[in-house]
Image (tube, rainbow, N blue to C red):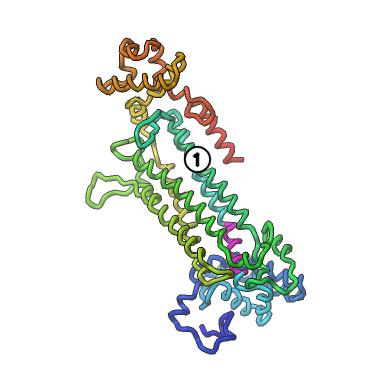
Amino acid sequence: MTNSQKLWGGRFTGNPDETFAEFNRSFGFDIRLFEADVRASIAHAHGLHGAGVLDADETAAVTGALRTMLELAAGDADYMNLDSEDVHSFIESRLVELVGDLGKKLHTGRSRNDQVATAFRLWLRDQIAHLQTDIKDLQAALIAVAERHQTAVMPGYTHLQRAQPVMWAHWCLAYLEMFARDSERLEDVAKRVNVMPLGSAALAGTSFSIDREAVAKELGFERVSANSLDAVSDRDFAIEFAGACSLIMVHLSRLAEDLILYASTEFGFVALSDAVSTGSSLMPQKKNPDALELVRGKAGRVFGHHAALLATMKGLPLAYNKDMQEDKETVFDALDTTRTCLKVTAIVLGNLSVNEARTREAATKGYLNATELADYLVKKGIPFRTAHESAGKIVLLGIETNRELVEIPLDEMRSVAAQINEDVYAALGLERTVASKSAIGGTAPSRVEKAIAAAKASLNG
């Protein structure tokens, strides 16, 4: 492509070096902004009509041609094959093919700087909605696997040591809460994405009397940017989006890590179906949780994109700099990776079963009811610190004699705390231990049942 074919070629007499020209091209990836850019161009044409730049016939011709381009792109895979520098020059070239020199009027009052910022925001606004749908689908999968094993009890862990028994469904709902916050964060990001830069031109604003607010209303933006320098020169909305994706990936990675552990022979809490597992090329007995390991691994990839955007923007002077071309691929891949991981994790949950006998057995071993013993003593009138110490001594007695708390005779317990009576054994039973955690947010089956109902109502609301 010669300089005369570019949007900026008039000032140049020589052609760019071929290696530089390819290095400078962004069409290979910013073509994803095509539909958003065309939508913004249609609205801009209406703005030019209002400003008296285009008459009614010209506006109809330009907007009609732009809509035709959308139809052609949707129906012909070869339509996008054109030697263009970027998506913006592609659109203008195709427009000129359809309406001649009239197409060259469309760029009046705008720059590629505000054009790309507008298309990027339009595209991202739509993608945030899709990402929230993926989160909702994963939450539905969490609820489904919780309900399939709603009576299952398992050990809860702190420091990766058995701590207290919890319901399997309670574990599922913990992640559901994390993803709910992720969706809320995206909603908050969307508010700052939904600001229209169009009309800021290169950096100083436009000298044409375009009604920016009318254009914004047509495109569904909540408001227009207040400062033209800021509008074209910052990508904090993209950084914030990548940060929100990073937090989603944190939660996906933690969920994956839990399930990888629980699927191991040492735990044996869950089994993954063949649909989401692979084997070993050497060891015939192996069944590997590769789907979950890939999710865990890809978290670092998204974190890297977030860090890359921060590093790209941190030293840029006002206003636009070509460095900002790097924002697209990072955001595109962060989105694609996050969406894929959400979908794959939902599939894994649909292909997962809980070994309820194994989790129940694990929940009754290792003194997970020690806190319940301390609480029992508190209810007998003993201060908690004293009760905690007494419960610890009884645990030590159990460890020394290889017995669980419920296996220690009453007289031995009373030698430590005389307030202990026969009713201690019922208090230390697994069902009672779990059922006693009935405060809001607790793991009691009755509370978990209400939480599942509330979660389903929220998702369906």
Location of the C terminus (image quadrant): top right
Residue 285's image quarter?
A: top left
Q: Nearer the viewer, residue 65 or 245?
A: 245
Reading the image, the residue beneath label 1 is 176
Residue 124, magenta (yes or no): yes
Dominant secondary structure of the magenta stretch? helix
Q: Which residues are magenta?
A: 114-126
95 is higher (above) or lower (below) than 327: below
Q: Is residue 54 left or right of residue 452?
A: right
Tag 1: Cα neighbours inside 10 Å, few (<14), some, or many (≥20)? many
Residue 287, magenta (yes or no): no
Kindly tell me whether residue 431 is visible in this rendering. Answer: no
Residue 304's image quarter?
A: bottom left
Q: Residue at x 45, y 18 (%)?
A: 383
Q: Residue at x 62, y 65 (%)?
A: 230
Residue 406 lies, in percent from the top left, at 34, 18
Instruction: Determine whether the residue tagged by mark 1 lies in a helix, strand or loop.
Output: helix
Q: Residue at x 61, y 79 (%)?
A: 97
Residue 171 lies, in percent from the top left, at 44, 35
Q: Nearer the viewer, residue 438 or 34?
A: 438
189 is higher (above) or lower (below) than 139: below
Q: Is residue 393 left or right of residue 91?
A: left
| Count of numbered badges drawn on the protein | 1
Q: Residue at x 59, y 40 (%)?
A: 460
Residue 141 lies, in percent from the top left, at 48, 41
Kindly tell me whether residue 126 is visible in this rendering. Answer: yes
Residue 132 lies, in percent from the top left, at 55, 49
